[in-house]
C-alpha cells in the first residue's frame, strides 16, 4: 500500500491551498516527502525557497534536492487549479512543474492530477484525475497506479524536460528600427532561436490622442519588462542602428530595458558596436557587441541548452546513485 506522497504544482500561486492538502494527507496516514510545511522566504528563478531549505545551496542544488524528495515518494499528486490562462475545466502547470513531471515520467513514478493539465502534450488517463479525497481512497483500497508503457514514458519525459524549458531572447530598440527588428527576428528564428519583438506602433489608428498613445506606450513598456523578467528569457539583443545621425544609438527606453535585463541576470547582446555614451555601463554589465553576427547568439544558446541538459541528466544520475532509484 502506498504511504508516501509528494505534492507538486505552483507554490507561488497555490501554496496556502497546498498546505491544506498536506495536512489532509497526513491526517489520512500519508507521509508527505515534499514540500515540507514551511514558510516561503522568497522566489528564486523558476521556484520558491522555503525556510527549511539550505539557503547556501545554488538553484541547481535546491532543484536536485527537491527532486530527490519527490522521487522518494511512492506517488506524486499535482495540485493544479485552473487560472486565468486555462479553461475552467483544466489545470495550470508552470514550467518547473512540467520539468518535474518529465523527470517523474522518465522514472516511472505514478502521477495524479487535481485537474487535467492544460497544454501538456502527454497522454493522461481519466483515472489519473482525482480529488485529494479520491486520491486517498484509491491508495487505501490498494488500487494500482496508471503507468505509461516504457517507450512512451521515456519519450514524454524527455520531451517535457526540453520543450517546456525552451529559452527565448527579446529584441529591444527604438521603434524607428521596427522593420529591422522583424528582419532580425526572422533571421534568429531561422537559426532555431525563439526571438520576441514588441507590438508595432504602426497598428495604432492615425487619429489617436496623445493621452491614449501615452497609455499605450506605458502598457507596452510594462508588458515588455515582464517578458524580460520571464523565467524563459535568457538574453536580450539591443538593436542599435543609426538614429538622427547618431551611430549605435540606444535611447532611454531601451536603456531601461537593458538595465532590467542586467538586474535579472539576462545575457545582453548589442547588435552593432557599443554605444560610446554608455560604454562604461555596458562593459561593466558584460554586454557583448556582436557586430551583426547572429551566430554568436546561436553559439550562446547552444551552450546554454547543452549545459542545462547536462545538469538535468547529472542531477537525475546523482539522485539514482544516492537513493538507489
Image (cartoon, rainbow, N blue to C red):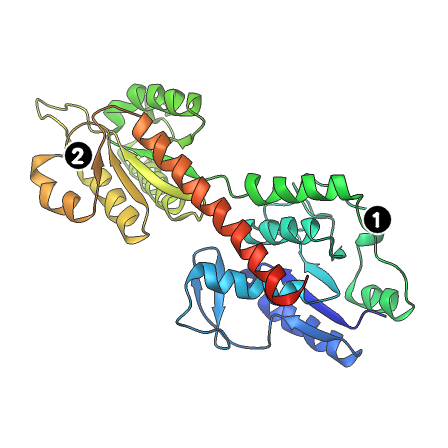
Is 33 displayed left or right of 219 in the figure?
right
**Residue situated in front as seen by the camera: 253 or 138:** 138
Residue drawn at the location 63% of the way across and 61% of the way down: 8
Q: Quadrant of residue 87?
A: top right
CA neighbours of label 1 inside 10 A, class few (<14), some (14 to 19), many (20+): few
Is 128 displayed left or right of 18 in the figure?
right
Quadrant (top left/top right/bottom left/bottom right) for the C terminus = bottom right
Image location of residue 164, percent across then percent down: 56, 42
Q: Which mark is residue 126?
A: 1
Is 283 displayed left or right of 171 in the figure?
left
Whether residue 253 is visible, yes or no, is: yes
Q: From this view, report whether residue 270 is shown above or below residue 142.
A: above
Q: Are marks 1 and 2 in contact (CB under 8 Å)?
A: no
Q: Secondary structure at mark 2?
A: loop
Q: From this view, report whether residue 102 is shown above or below residue 7.
A: above
Whether residue 123 is visible, yes or no, is: no
Quadrant (top left/top right/bottom left/bottom right) for the N terminus = bottom right
Q: Earlier in the sequence, mark 1 or mark 2?
A: 1
Image location of residue 18, percent across then percent down: 64, 68
Residue drawn at the location 20% of the way across and 26% of the way down: 291
The residue under label 2 is 250
Q: Nearer the viewer, mark 1 or mark 2?
A: 1
Q: Secondary structure at mark 1?
A: helix
Alpha carbon of mark 1 to alpha carbon of mark 2: how far? 54 Å
Q: From this view, report whether residue 103 is shown above or below residue 177.
A: below
Q: How many marks?
A: 2
Residue drawn at the location 39% of the way across and 39% of the way down: 303
Q: From this view, report whether residue 315 is shown above or below residue 213.
A: below
Image location of residue 292, percent across then percent down: 24, 23
Residue drawn at the location 88% of the way across and 59% of the way down: 144
Amino acid at each position: 500500500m502506498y504511504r508516501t506522497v509528494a505534492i507538486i504544482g505552483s507554490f507561488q500561486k497555490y501554496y496556502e491551498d497546498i498546505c491544506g492538502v498536506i495536512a489532509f494527507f497526513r491526517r489520512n496516514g500519508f507521509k508527505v516527502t515534499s514540500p515540507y510545511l514551511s514558510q516561503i522566504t522568497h522566489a528564486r528563478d523558476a521556484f520558491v525557497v522555503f525556510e527549511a531549505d539550505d539557503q547556501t545551496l545554488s538553484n541547481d542544488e535546491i532543484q536536485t534536492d527537491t527532486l530527490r524528495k519527490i522521487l522518494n515518494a511512492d506517488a506524486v499528486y499535482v495540485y493544479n487549479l485552473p487560472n486565468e490562462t486555462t479553461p475552467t475545466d483544466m489545470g495550470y502547470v508552470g514550467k518547473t512543474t512540467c520539468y518535474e513531471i518529465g523527470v517523474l515520467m522518465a522514472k516511472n513514478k505514478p502521477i495524479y492530477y487535481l485537474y487535467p493539465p492544460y497544454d501538456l502534450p502527454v497522454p493522461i488517463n481519466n483515472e489519473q484525475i482525482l480529488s485529494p479525497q479520491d486520491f486517498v481512497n484509491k491508495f487505501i483500497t490498494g488500487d494500482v497506479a496508471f503507468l505509461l508503457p516504457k517507450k512512451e514514458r521515456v519519450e514524454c519525459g524527455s520531451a517535457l524536460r526540453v520543450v517546456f524549458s525552451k529559452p527565448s531572447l527579446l529584441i529591444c530598440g527604438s521603434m524607428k528600427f521596427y522593420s529591422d527588428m522583424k528582419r532580425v527576428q526572422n533571421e534568429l528564428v531561422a537559426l532555431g532561436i525563439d526571438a520576441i519583438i514588441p507590438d508595432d506602433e504602426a497598428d495604432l489608428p492615425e487619429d489617436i490622442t496623445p493621452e491614449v498613445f501615452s497609455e499605450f506606450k506605458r502598457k507596452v513598456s510594462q508588458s515588455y519588462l515582464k517578458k524580460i523578467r520571464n523565467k524563459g528569457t535568457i538574453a536580450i539583443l539591443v538593436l542599435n542602428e543609426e538614429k538622427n545621425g547618431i551611430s549605435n544609438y540606444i535611447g532611454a527606453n531601451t536603456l531601461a530595458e537593458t538595465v532590467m535585463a542586467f538586474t535579472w541576470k539576462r545575457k545582453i547582446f548589442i547588435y552593432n558596436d557599443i554605444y560610446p555614451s554608455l560604454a562604461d555601463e555596458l562593459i561593466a554589465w558584460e554586454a557583448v557587441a556582436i557586430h551583426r553576427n547572429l551566430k554568436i547568439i546561436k553559439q550562446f544558446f547552444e551552450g546554454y541548452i547543452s549545459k542545462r541538459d547536462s545538469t538535468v541528466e547529472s542531477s537525475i544520475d546523482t539522485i539514482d546513485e544516492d537513493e538507489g532509484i
